[in-house]
Structure formats: C-alpha cells, structure tokens
Image (cartoon, grey):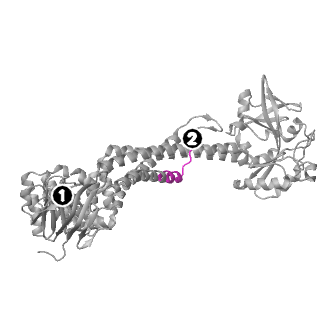
C-alpha cells in the first residue's frame, strides 16, 4: 500500500473522533512535557550540586587514616592462619600524616594540580551562652586560595585577616547565624585537648553547601596546631586538579604510593551521588507512569476506531487491502497521535522549563538555592520524543493487529 | 461472446461452518461464468446464495472444492495473494454501500486505484471522475456518503467496484435497500456491465423479476443448485 493512502485514511479516522484524539494527544504531550521539565530540574540540581562540590571542596583529600588497619606482625608470620589476639591496645602516638612534608613536596612535582596542607579537628566554639561544635581547619591561606574557593565564598572580611589579626578565625555563615556572631566579635574556641583560644572573627563565608556552612571554620595552621596541641602536625592534604575527571585515578595512585586513605570528591560525596541515582529512578518511573496512562488513551481511541470501523475494514479487505495494509493504517494512527503529541509536549515542556526558570524562591537543603537550577539539553527532547513515539506505536499495535485479523466475510455477512 | 476458459469457475465447492452441529452453507457447487455473462443467483433466505458469492469472491475459503479465476486454482494461495487477486480482478457491491464515511464520493472511488498504485495521481482522479460521470454522479463527486441518497450511494459503490477495471463483478443484494426506481437503475447498470463491457457479473438477489433479466439464473435451495 502506498504510504500516503494509509496516512490519509488514518488521518480521516482521527479527525472524525476529534475529542478522543485530543485527549490522547494531551496524554502524550503531558508525559513528554513533564519529562522535559522534571529532567531539566533534576539534572539541573544535580549538575549544580556537583559543580558546587567541585568548585568549593578539594578534588582529592589525603587523610591520616588507613583503609584497612595495618597487619599485626603475627599475621604476616603465619599467613592465612586463624589468629586470635587478646588485649590489643592501639599505640598512643601523635596522629597525623607522617612525612607530610615529603608527601607535599612529591605531589607538588606533579603537573596540573595544587596542594594545600590542613590540620583539621573538632572544637567547641563558645560565644556568650552558645556552645557550637565546629570543625576547625588550620590552613595556609596562600595555598588555600589555590585549592578551594574559600576566598571567593567570603561574604565578609578577607582571607588575609588570618595573617593580620592575632588570633583570627573565619566562620561559616550558618555558624555565625546560629550563635549570633558578627564580624570582629571575639569568640572562645575550646579544643578536646583543653586548650582555649580567644579568637577574633575576621571573615564569614557562604559556600552554598549547607553542611559546610554550618560546621566549618578556618584558622591559621599554627593556631590550629596550638589548639590541638599537635605542633608541626598536619592531618589532611587537599589537592585541586586542573582536570576534575582525573580525581579518582589520582586518589588511587596516591593511596597506593603513600598508604594513606585518599578520597576523591566522588567518594567524599558518595552519599549524595547515591541519592541522585534514586532521584533519577523516581523521575523515570514517574514519567513512565504518565506515558503508560497516555498509552491507555491511545489504545482506547484506536480500539474504538477499530470497533467502529469494522465495516470499513471489511470493505477495504474485500477490495484487496492486505492484512498488513490494515494494520499499517491503525499503527499510523498511533504514530500520528504520538508524533503530534510529542511536538506539543516539546512546546509545553519548553514553556514549563522557561516558567520554572523565571521562578524565584529561597530554599535550603543540601545546598542553598534561589530558584530552580535548570539543565537544558536537546538530549531531553530526543529521549522524551523517542519514548512518546515508541509508547504510542505500541499502544496502537495491539488494536491494529486485531483489526488486521478480522475476516472480511464475517463483517460483510454480519452486516448484510 | 463466450471465451474458451471460463473467467470464474467453482468446482465441487463446499463450505461448512465447524461446530458441535456443523452447518453446511453450500454443498458441491459446480458453476462457470464466462466474460460478458450476467448470472443471477436466487433462492430463499438461508439458501446459501450469499455464502456462495463470498466463496466465489475469495472472501471466504471453502471447506472443500476450489474456485478458479482465469482458469487458475486459488486453493492454497496465501491471504496476500488472494487480496492482490481481489484488488486487480474483482469488484464488489454489497447490499449496504460500505462507502468509507469520511471520504467524498470521488475519494471513495479513488481508494482501490490508489491501493493498486498503477495509475498516476492525475489519472486516478480522472478515472474516478469519469466513472462517477458515467453513473450520472458528476455533480455529487465532492459529497460525503451521508449527503447522498441511497441510490446515489449504491451507484458510487458500483463506481468504486469498477475502479480497477475488474473482469468480475460480484454483487450481493445490490438493490435490497433501494426503492424500485433506483433498483431499476442499478440493475440495468449491471446488465450493461456484462453486455456492453464484457465483464462477468454475478448478482445475488431475491427479486425474481430482476433475476429474470439475467442471462442465466442459478437457483439455490439449502446450499445446492436446483434446476
């Protein structure tokens, strides 16, 4: 059968049942539009989050920990034996990266990366009646500004403030707000070692990542070492890379070389990245459900057409239309509803995305945001279009097959 | 004018409906129709005349026996081959016009030609208009079936049956739903198709008066031909 004839018959059928056709079109269009809107919102959020992480936190962090505890001498002596050790006590030693200078020196030789040492530890920040548990990072500002964007995140004060003030401290915005601390206020910082330092707030930063803003503070390396009573010790080396994609490979090679636990940014935010996988699964199943409902609409309209057009099918077959010709007519109908629905959905989806982009609101979850961050890509249109077309073709296929199997003699005899 | 080989032939044609109590629609029918011959099939209701017509028109497959078109047996042909044969060699007219309601008279007549796909679009349109004009429907070509009278619709159906210039015209009670005047018009049309255009025409009718004007009359009772 020449395609134009099949398309002409299909089109007339659909135009004859305008209301049902429009309902099915809307089903497909809404499915496609929602997919585009939701996908752009979700992926926008995810990409924004990843960008913020890549931007603000180090790409690779070397910690003063080991992934597996060091083997006991007896274990290496009797490899594979069952060994029970009692009364084992951890060595009381100064924690920190041993040979940190050598590690840093070695890393600085490598091209395409910047290195900053840190001594990070917990402390209590006391201001008036408030006690806040915070993470105190001892940093070297000149190196820090190469590795993290702390300097850019400052909403008050300067990174140099750490050098100029006697005991300077930079707080996250969340910490400052919770305790009601303003710039130049004096706070007490109490370490687990019992050291108390009176420190002056020389800066407040806002990274946009809530956990960081509510928990992190920065002081000079020397002050942190005093506070933690760990002179000349660092326990973190943080690395920023020119090529973010290399983070995991670099982390592995560093860990293999120096033995210390080394985490890439992916590993550090694996919990959130795991949530993204679930988010995407939810998105695809929601949109899938919408499209299935749309499929029922198409199935319904084409089934009705097949039922109503039984006589026409009979006469077309007696005229000499093959089974496949009849099937094609009704599959064309599904394809038409699908194609037009997809195009309508594209337009609607585009409008929805633009509308969401224009919304402004404040939200604080994983990250602080002032509206939807939307990711716009032709990929969403291609995926949703393909899903819409496949779904509508499938929905049309079943009634089309039934139509093609009708026997002309049954129809002609029944009607006459 | 009779050809040596009958254009349509039935050999010991039998059709049974299977079931707990099998029903025999037609039994052991032997008949031949030659080009230019106008055959009327008559008989009481339920005598199997329509069933015979469907078998002759390859719309139904016989339980036993065979239908020969142009001397070629059709038993064992695939559904597609049968459809192609119907498209090129047969024209059907039924009691109900069976026009596609969404298409104009002209479009309805064009559909078999477009399916065959031999003529150009312009030629198809030209032939559709020619056929409608021949049947006195030139002014109605643009109308939808629902805008026409019963007689007009049936004439459009005849025009459609003639679209691919078939050698065989099969009609099942074509005048059953028409008033006397329209019935007369349609019937004389079939008469012409046989006598003037040399087509083989088989018409099922219960109207003995009309049947009397056929070249030959086949009378069926209980699925068998009675003399």
Q: Chain of mark 1?
A: B
Q: Measured along the vertical axis of the image, is residue A409 above or below residue A162?
A: below
Q: Chain of mark 2?
A: A
Cα distance between the residues tagged 2 and 1: 74 Å
Residue B66 inside the magenta-drawn segment:
no
For the point 23% across and 70% down, the residue is B69
> How far across and down, in percent of the image, does residue B103 sit?
24, 54
> How far across and down, in percent of the image, does residue A362 sit?
59, 34
Give the side of residue A176 with respect to residue A48, left or right: right
The magenta span reads: A372-385
Name the quarter where the N terminus of chain A is drawn.
bottom left
Would you name the residue on which mark 1 appears? B49
Give the side of residue A176 with respect to residue A163, left or right: left
Q: Which mark is residue A372?
A: 2
Q: Give the residue at the far top of this rendering.
A: A129
Q: Give the residue at the far front of this rendering.
A: B21
């Amino acid at each position: 059968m020449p395609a134009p004839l099949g398309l002409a018959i299909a089109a007339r059928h659909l135009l004859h049942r305008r209301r049902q056709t429009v309902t099915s079109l809307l089903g497909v269009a809404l499915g496609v539009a929602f997919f585009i809107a939701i996908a752009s919102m979700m992926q926008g959020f995810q990409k924004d989050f990843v960008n913020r992480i890549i931007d603000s936190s180090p790409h690779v962090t070397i910690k003063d920990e080991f992934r597996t505890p060091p083997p006991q001498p007896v274990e290496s002596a009797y490899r594979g034996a069952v060994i029970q050790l009692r009364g084992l006590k951890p060595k009381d030693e100064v924690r920190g990266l041993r040979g940190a200078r050598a590690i840093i020196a070695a890393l600085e030789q490598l091209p395409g990366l910047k290195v900053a040492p840190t001594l990070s530890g917990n402390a209590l920040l006391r201001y008036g009646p408030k006690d806040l548990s915070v993470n105190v990072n001892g940093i070297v500002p000149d190196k820090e500004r190469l590795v993290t964007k702390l300097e850019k995140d400052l909403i008050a004060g300067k990174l140099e403030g750490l050098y100029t003030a006697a005991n300077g401290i930079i707080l996250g915005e969340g910490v400052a707000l919770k305790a009601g601390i303003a710039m130049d206020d004096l706070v007490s910082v109490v370490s687990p070692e019992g050291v108390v330092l009176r420190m002056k707030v020389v800066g407040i930063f806002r990274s946009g990542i809530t956990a960081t803003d509510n928990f992190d503070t920065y002081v000079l390396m020397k002050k942190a070492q005093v506070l933690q009573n760990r002179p000349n010790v660092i326990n973190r080396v943080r690395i920023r890379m020119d090529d973010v994609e290399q983070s995991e490979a670099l982390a592995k090679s560093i860990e293999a070389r120096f033995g210390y636990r080394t985490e890439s940014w992916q590993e550090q935010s694996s919990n959130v990245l795991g949530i993204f996988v679930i988010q995407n699964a939810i998105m695809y199943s929601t949109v899938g459900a919408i499209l299935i409902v749309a499929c029922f609409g198409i199935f319904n309209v084409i089934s009705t057409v097949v039922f109503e057009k039984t006589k026409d099918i009979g006469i077309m077959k007696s005229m000499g239309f093959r089974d496949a010709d009849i099937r094609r007519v009704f599959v064309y109908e599904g394809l038409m509803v699908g194609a037009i629905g997809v195009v309508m959905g594209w337009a609607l989806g585009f409008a929805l995305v633009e509308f969401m982009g224009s919304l402004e609101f404040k939200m604080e979850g994983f990250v602080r945001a002032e509206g939807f961050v939307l990711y716009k890509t032709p990929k969403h249109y291609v995926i949703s279009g393909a899903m819409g077309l496949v779904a509508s073709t499938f929905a049309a296929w079943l009634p089309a097959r039934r139509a093609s199997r009708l026997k002309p003699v049954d129809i002609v005899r029944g009607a006459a | 004018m009779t050809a040596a080989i009958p254009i349509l032939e039935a050999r010991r044609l039998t059709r049974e409906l299977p079931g707990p109590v099998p029903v025999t629609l037609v039994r052991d029918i032997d008949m031949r129709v030659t080009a230019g011959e106008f055959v009327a099939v008559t008989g009481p209701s339920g005598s199997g005349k329509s069933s015979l017509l469907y078998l002759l028109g390859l719309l139904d497959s016989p339980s036993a026996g065979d239908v020969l078109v142009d001397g070629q047996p059709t038993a064992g042909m695939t559904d597609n081959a049968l459809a192609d044969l119907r498209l090129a060699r047969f024209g059907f007219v039924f009691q109900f016009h069976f026009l596609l309601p969404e298409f104009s008279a002209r479009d309805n007549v064009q559909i078999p030609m477009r399916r065959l796909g031999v003529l150009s679009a312009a030629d198809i349109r030209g032939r559709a208009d020619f056929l409608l004009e021949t049947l006195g429907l030139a002014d109605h070509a643009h109308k939808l079936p629902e805008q026409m009278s019963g007689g007009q619709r049936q004439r459009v159906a005849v025009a459609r049956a003639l679209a691919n210039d078939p050698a065989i015209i099969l009609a099942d009670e074509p005048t059953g739903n028409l008033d006397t005047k329209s019935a007369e018009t349609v019937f004389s049309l079939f008469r012409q198709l046989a006598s003037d255009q040399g087509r083989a025409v088989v018409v099922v009718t219960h109207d003995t008066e009309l049947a009397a004007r056929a070249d030959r009359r086949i009378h069926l009772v209980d699925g068998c031909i009675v003399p």
